[in-house]
Structure formats: C-alpha cells, structure tokens
C-alpha cells in the first residue's frame, strides 16, 4: 500500500483512455523501493495497459558536468535493465523533462511523477501539469516522511523538527510490495538514448567536461547496496563515535546515491533500524532527521541558494561584523586550486576535486573558512555553492544547499561573538587537531591519484 500522504494531484485533467500509463522518472532513478513506479504499475494494471517509463536528460540542469552525469548514466543504465526485467521500457530522451513528458504523454492514460524539492524540479512539474491533457499524479519517493506531512512550515532547526518527524516515522517506515505488470511495454519502438554509451551520450551535451568522472564512486543501485551492506557490517557499530573523524572511514558513502535517487531512503532506514547496533540511532538521526530537515528547508524557503535564506539573527550579526579585518583573503580561483595557507583546508578541497565527495566534518570546516577568507558574506556564500555544486557528486540537492547554509548559521544557534563571524559558530584548525589526527587525514588525501582525463 502506498500511503495517501505521498500522493498529490498536480492538475485537474481526467484520466484518459490511452495506450499506456506513463511513469515520468526524474528524482527516483531506481527500479526498486520506488513508490511512484509502483503506483504507475498498479494504475496500468487496473487499466489492463502496459506501464512505460520516461526520463528526460537535459544539459540545462544547473552546473551539470561530466562527473555528475557519468554517475547518473551509470545508474540509469542499471535501472533501464532492471525495469526491462519487470516488463517496463525506460525511454531516455535528450530533452528538457517537462517538454519530453508532454510529448510522451500524448498517448498516455495517466502520468505519474516522483517529487523534487528544488526550484527547477518544481518548475518542470508545474509546466508539465499545464501542458498535459491527462491527469498528472505526483508520488513522494525521496523522503521517509513526506515533506508537508513532517511539517507545514519551514523549521528553525533540528531541535524544532526532530519531535515532529520522529513521532511520524513508524507510520512511514514500511516496505512496499513490488507489483508485476500484467502487460509489458518492451515491444514499443520509442527511440531512446543508450546510457551504456556514456561517452557518446555526453558528447552530445553542452556541459563542463573538465570535471571528470570520479575514480572512487560508480553509480547504480547495486553499487549503493554494496556500500551500504559493508557499512552495516563493518562501520555502523562505531558510527556514533567515529563518523566525525575524517582520518578514518566510518561513513556510509550513500549521499551520492541518495542524491540521484538510486537507492530508497525508506529501505536504507528500515535496514538500519532493524539492527541492534549501538550506532543505529546516530545514523537514523543523520539519515532521516537531518536529511529531511534539508528537504524542509529548500521546499519552504525559495531563497535557499542565497544568504537571504539565513535567519534574522545571522543576518544581523554578520552585518555588524561585515567590516572586520579578515586574517586572509583568497580569490575564488585560489580557493578552487587549494592554494591557501591552511593544509587542512587544502586537503579537503583536494579530496572534493579529485573524488567528488568531501568528508562531512571537513565540509563544515571548509565552508566556515570560506566565510572567514572572503571579503563579503555574499561572495563567500556564492563561492561555497559554486565549488560544492561543481565538484561534489551529492551537490545541487537539498542536503548540499542546507549544508552550505549551515556553515553561515542556518539551523544553528548564536555562539560567543568573534571577529568576522559575530555570533555564528566558529571552527579553527586547533579544534581539528584536538578532535582527531588531522595530519593523517592530510596524508591520506595527499596519496589520492588524480582521475584519468
């Protein structure tokens, strides 16, 4: 059963008597643990029609590049095959998703779409809702608790959000059943890109090719599940104590896969919750409370990608200290090249540039220092987003935007006043050395090989 809270009707059109039910896959790029896909298959079965899936591949998604799109295509290749095994053809078209779905829906009885929270994702769905001549149903797939069910407003911090969502989690932490289509769509002749041909697909797109594929992270549901099973087996027990030590590796490494919807957040949370590990509560706090606080942020705050998103006390304290002398000032180019006086910051930047993911604790330090070393808050915020979204595979999503904003005081409380930061939380290199062997982290990063170009 798909909870009714996951469903919303995006237009007022009626269901038609078409040739198939169309699943518009965008946020949930997976063939399992996908409520939108299940809804579409069940609707198709009720109509005794096949279910057809569509994905719009566009080079106009902000800051798309060869790294992020390679990872995505690796996942889509696996998903296309897995859907075919279920009797569902996935058609991948090089088109803006809203335009592509309008074309594909001409012969559809019904269109079902997953949910996205960013501005561009909402715009795609809104334009499609206007253009379609059949019903468009949205199914929430990328949170454990649907965003508007968790809270009807933007939350101040995890402290206000946590009690609201925790009481709802048991109602939504349930595995759905997989439905077999009564008719398959595999015989259809709709032209589709071949995601296996990554080089060929990328060559036709206008993207940044200088940020090359990660040598460490390969996309796909299978790869995500392999990493997660390793995490459950070898790391979860110590996650609560050691997750903030970047010189060790006690993370799940799931954020890139969650970013592209290649693994179900409900499935991940259920598997962790079913263990008797002492680390599971700390993991579920990150996986559900913190991650879904990010969805709450970008859904309710349209200014999530600018300093305008910051709370009033943050704006006031940063404005009060806007003219404070900065100990160092670096250009965006120097920061991007990792040319600062701080070996720890440079190592974090190098980690992100080379492999496409920075350790979460170092990302906090990294963002704080960009604020400290930039002439204005506005420039610092823009630089942090630019670098994060350009190099991180898990950038350009709610967690990415919330993570950058957190470095500037979002979802936090006032601390002791300091120059430049005012009452915004401060971090320094002494704190890194006190908490863990940060020099070992630097050595680890120094040993990374640059990816092949």
Image (tube, rainbow, N blue to C red):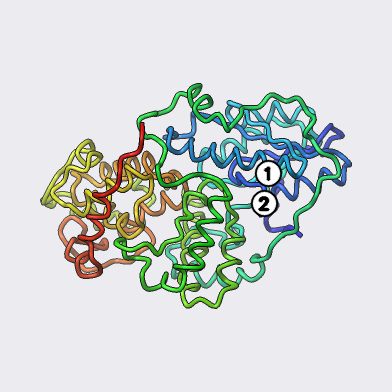
* SS at circle 2: loop
Residue depicted at 26% across the width and 49% down the height: 447
Outermost top residue:
204
Estimate the x, y position of residue 42 in percent, counting from the top left. 80, 49
Between 308 and 115, which is closer to the camera in this rendering? 115
Pointer 2 residue: 32
Quarter of the image with the N terminus is bottom right
- In the image, which disc is placed on residue 82? 1
> From the viewer's perspective, is residue 339 above or below residue 3?
above
> From the viewer's perspective, is residue 269 above or below residue 445?
below
The mark tally for this picture is: 2
> From the viewer's perspective, is residue 271 above or below residue 374?
below
* SS at circle 1: helix
Estimate the x, y position of residue 426 in percent, counting from the top left. 23, 62
Neighbour tally class for label 1: few under 14, some 14-19, many 20 plus, Cα within 10 Å: some
Residue depicted at 21% across the width and 57% down the height: 421
**Viewed as shown, does residue 352 lie left or right of 46?**
left
Distance CA(mark 2)–CA(mark 1): 9 Å
Among numbered discs 2 and 1, the one appearing first in the sequence: 2
Between 388 and 67, which is closer to the camera in this rendering? 67
Q: Which of the 4 quarters of the picture holds residue 109?
A: top right
Between 238 and 117, which is closer to the camera in this rendering? 238
**Viewed as shown, does residue 81 lie left or right of 243?**
right
Quarter of the image with the C terminus is top left
Residue depicted at 43% across the width and 27% down the height: 207
């Amino acid at each position: 059963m798909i909870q009714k809270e996951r469903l919303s009707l995006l237009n007022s059109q009626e269901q038609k008597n078409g040739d198939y039910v169309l699943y518009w896959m965008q946020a949930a790029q997976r063939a399992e643990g996908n409520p939108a896909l299940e809804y579409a298959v069940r609707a198709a079965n009720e109509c005794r029609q096949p279910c057809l899936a569509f994905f719009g591949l566009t080079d106009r998604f902000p800051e798309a590049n060869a790294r992020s799109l390679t990872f995505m295509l690796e996942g889509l290749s696996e998903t296309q095959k897995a859907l075919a095994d279920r009797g569902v053809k996935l058609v991948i078209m090089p088109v803006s998703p809203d335009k592509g779905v309008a074309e594909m829906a001409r012969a559809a009885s019904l269109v079902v779409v997953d949910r996205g929270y960013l501005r561009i994702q909402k715009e795609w769905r809104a334009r499609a809702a206007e253009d379609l001549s059949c019903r468009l149903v949205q199914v929430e797939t990328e949170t454990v608790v649907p965003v508007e069910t968790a809270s009807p407003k933007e939350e101040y911090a995890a402290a206000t959000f946590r009690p609201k969502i925790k009481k709802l989690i048991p109602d939504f932490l349930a595995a759905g059943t997989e439905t077999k289509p009564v008719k398959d769509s595999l015989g259809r002749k709709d032209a589709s890109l071949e995601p296996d041909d990554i080089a060929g697909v990328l060559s036709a797109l206008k993207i940044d090719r200088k940020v090359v594929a990660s040598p460490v992270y390969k996309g796909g549901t299978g790869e995500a599940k392999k990493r997660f099973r390793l995490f459950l087996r070898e790391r979860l027990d110590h996650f609560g104590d050691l997750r903030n030590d970047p010189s060790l590796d006690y993370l799940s490494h799931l954020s890139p896969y969650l970013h592209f919807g290649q693994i179900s957040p409900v499935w991940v949370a259920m598997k962790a919750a079913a263990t008797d590990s002492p680390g599971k509560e700390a993991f579920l706090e990150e996986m559900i409370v913190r991650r879904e606080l990010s969805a709450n942020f970008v859904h309710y705050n349209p200014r999530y990608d600018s300093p305008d998103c910051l709370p009033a006390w943050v704006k006031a304290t940063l404005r009060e200290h806007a003219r404070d002398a900065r100990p160092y000032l670096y250009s965006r180019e120097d920061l991007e090249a990792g040319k600062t006086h701080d070996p720890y910051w440079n190592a974090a930047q190098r980690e992100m540039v080379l492999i496409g993911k920075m350790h979460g604790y170092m990302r906090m330090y990294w963002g704080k220092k960009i604020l400290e070393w930039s002439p204005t808050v506005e420039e610092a915020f823009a630089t942090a987003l630019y670098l994060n979204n350009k190099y991180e595979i898990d950038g350009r999503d709610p967690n990415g935007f919330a993570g950058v904003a957190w470095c500037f005081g979002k979802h936090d409380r006032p601390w002791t006043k300091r120059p430049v930061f005012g009452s915004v939380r401060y971090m320094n290199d002494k704190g890194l050395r006190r908490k863990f062997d940060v020099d070992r982290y630097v050595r680890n990063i120094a040993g990374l090989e640059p990816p092949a170009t």
